[in-house]
Image (cartoon, helix red, strand yellow):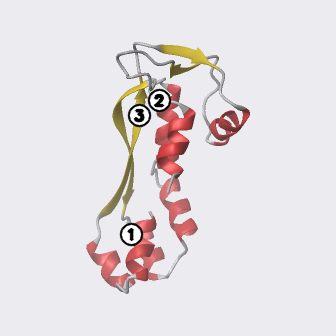
Amino acid sequence: MAALHRFLDMGIEAFLLSSSVLGIVSQRLVRRVCRSCAAPYEPTPEEMAFYQESDGIPKDTFLRGTGCHICAQTGYQDRIGVYEFLHMTPEIRRLLVGWATQDELRRVAIKQGMRTLRAEGISLVQQDVTTISEVIRSIYAL
């Protein structure tokens, strides 16, 4: 999503972007919970606040790895991609040419069905693929 405004900051004209870009993909990698040592845990209050603000469905148990010889005591093994795809619809194109803010573009894109990195990350937490702290670390770390 921010890529559009980065292009504009580089001096590329909005009308050129709107006519040539078909879509933008953002991606992050999050670590998977090690299945060999996965165990229930209680998320911190900050993690639970993030989970609830992200519209995570209520869960009784959350999983994280405790560390074993398979995951080299990290609690994680392997990674999985988290993706966000912005499709350049006619409405997004009009907003871009009209110098809409990044928040306005995001709001319209979500209204049109875009799933954000945050929503995709929380979906992986709901499926016990990763942890809340890993989503926060991977998606929001600079």
**SS class, disc 3:** strand
For marks 3 and 2, give the CA distance: 6 Å
* Residue 90: image tag: 1
User: Callout 3, which amino acid?
Assistant: Arg
Residue at left offset 34%, top offset 76%: 18
The image shows residue 142, relative to residue 60, as above or below, that is below
Residue 75: percent from the left, percent from the top?
46, 23
For marks 3 and 1, give the CA distance: 36 Å
Residue at left offset 44%, top offset 22%: 73
Task: Specify the quadrant that holds the N terminus.
Answer: bottom left
The image shows residue 115, relative to residue 6, as above or below, that is above
Residue at left offset 41%, top offset 71%: 4
User: Callout 2, which amino acid?
Assistant: Thr
Nearer the observer: mark 3 or 1; the answer is 3
Please name the residue that numbered disc 2 is placed on: 130
User: Callout 1, which amino acid?
Assistant: Pro
Among the 4 quarters of the image, the one containing residue 25:
bottom left
**SS class, disc 2:** loop
* Residue 31: image tag: 3
